[in-house]
Amino acid sequence: MSDPLLVTGLHRSGTTWAGRMLCLSGEAGYIHEPFNPARRPSWSGGRIPFWFQYICAENENEFEPILQDVLEFRYPLLANLRDPRTYKRVGILAREYPGAYMSRLRHLRPLLKDPMALFSAEWLAHRFGARVVVMIRHPAAFAGSIKRLNWQFKFRSWLAQDLLLRDWLRPYEERMREYS
């Protein structure tokens, strides 16, 4: 497997566009948001518990096999078929499973497009040799986009990750609790 690419950063910052553009070369296979715990069907088979999951040396044993399968384009078809199906989900399965199969057959470079992988980018780079692209966006444009979509952010996923708090977010813990 050649070194994977990770396109991450803020959500609403152009990660989908950048990932799609990088795949136009025909040398990379697109993997859409394997770290998204709400996405069904899912490249991770629904085994990523938190939004913005933090993976590091202390918890890698739980996640490494999942990510190894994702990076080898081993799409968890059976796990995804167990989920209740809607026309939209069937359409996603019908697109992603053959895409994964063809990417594996053609030995394409895996490209993970996932803003939720931001906190795990360092681990992905060290463990799998991922080349990381971090997308940023002007704060006013980001806030305007989130407001227009009426999206909320719940800090509970960050607060529930002890390792993430320990390594990065402890100074902000009280403020996050206020807004949760």
Image (cartoon, rainbow, N blue to C red):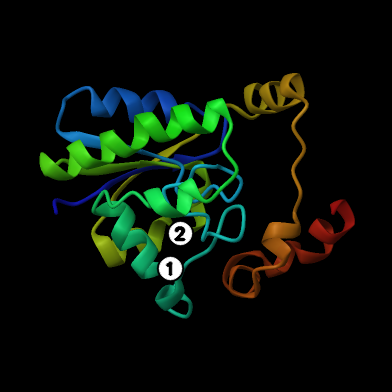
What's under tag 2, amino acid-wise?
Answer: Ser
Q: Quadrant of the C terminus?
A: bottom right
Q: Quadrant of the N terminus?
A: bottom left
* Residue 137 in sight from this viewpoint: no
Could you tell me which secondary element the residue under label 1 belongs to? helix
Q: Residue at x 38, y 63 (%)?
A: 66
Q: Residue furthest right?
A: 178
Q: Earlier in the sequence, mark 1 or mark 2?
A: 1
Q: Residue at x 60, y 43 (%)?
A: 84
Q: Quadrant of residue 98?
A: top left
Could you tell me which secondary element the residue under label 2 belongs to? helix
* Residue to which mark 2 is pinned: 120
Residue 70 in percent (x, y) is at 33, 53
Answer few, some or many: residues within 10 Å of disc 1's Cα (few below 14, many 20 plus, some between 14 and 19): some
Residue 82 in percent (x, y) is at 52, 51
Q: Residue furthest bottom?
A: 58
In the image, 154: left or right of 25?
A: right
Residue 73 in percent (x, y) is at 26, 48
Quick check: marks 1 and 2 in contact, CB under 8 Å? yes
Q: Quadrant of residue 53?
A: bottom right
What's under tag 1, amino acid-wise?
Answer: Phe
Q: How many marks?
A: 2
Q: Which numbered marker is on residue 63? A: 1
